[in-house]
Amino acid sequence: MIFKLLVSTGLIAMTLSTPSQAADTAVKLAPCPNTPNCVSSQAPKDSGHYIAPFKIKGKVEDAWAALQRTLAGQKRTVITEAGNGALHAEATTLVFRFVDDVDAVLDADAKLIHIRSASRVGYSDLGVNRRRMEALRRQLQQAGIVE
């Protein structure tokens, strides 16, 4: 009994003293593959994958809510996960019904929304993912949410 108590106490202490990995992953997007069918605001700036993050103008909470509303309002796009400053959506192409993954993470301290859009299959997307993210940026700019 004492052994179990010591082990439990030790595990709790180790958990509390270990830096939270959730905080690290909350602002990290998956890297883009070596194919040209992905854009990410966290890709190296000198890569063909880089796209600028969304710079928030006003309240972070308002911008995050507006992003979700705007994404949900796009044709053939469904938000499949949202919470804790991260979201994942799936956008289906019109003709061939390919599914592209759209991810966003909120960096509240920097007042940025990092974005990523990537095709699940194929090599080239003919610029579809970049155009999708720039169209989203324009919608949020027109609403006065981002720069």
Image (spheres, rainbow, N blue to C red):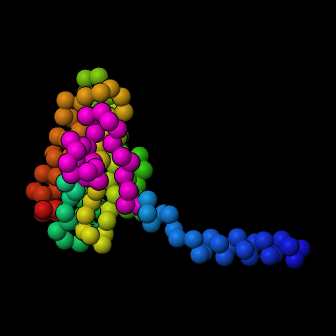
Q: Count numbered badges in the picture.
A: 0
Is residue 40 magenta-colored? yes
When the figure is inspected, residue 140 is found, relative to residue 10, above or below; the finding is: above
For the view shown, which residue lies furthest in the right direction?
Answer: 1
Q: Nearer the viewer, residue 99 or 120?
A: 120
For the view shown, which residue lies furthest in the left direction?
Answer: 142
* Percent coordinates x, y for residue 3 in the rendering: 86, 73
Secondary structure mostly seen in the magenta stretch: loop
* Percent coordinates x, y for residue 37 in the rendering: 27, 34
Q: Is residue 78 left or right of residue 124?
A: right
Residue at 52% x, 70% y is: 19
When the figure is inspected, residue 36 is found, relative to residue 81, above or below; the finding is: above
- Bounds of the magenta segment: 26-50
* Percent coordinates x, y for residue 44 in the rendering: 26, 51
Q: Quadrant of the N terminus?
A: bottom right
When the figure is inspected, residue 11 is found, relative to residue 30, above or below; the finding is: below
Query: In which quarter of the view is residue 140 placed?
Result: bottom left
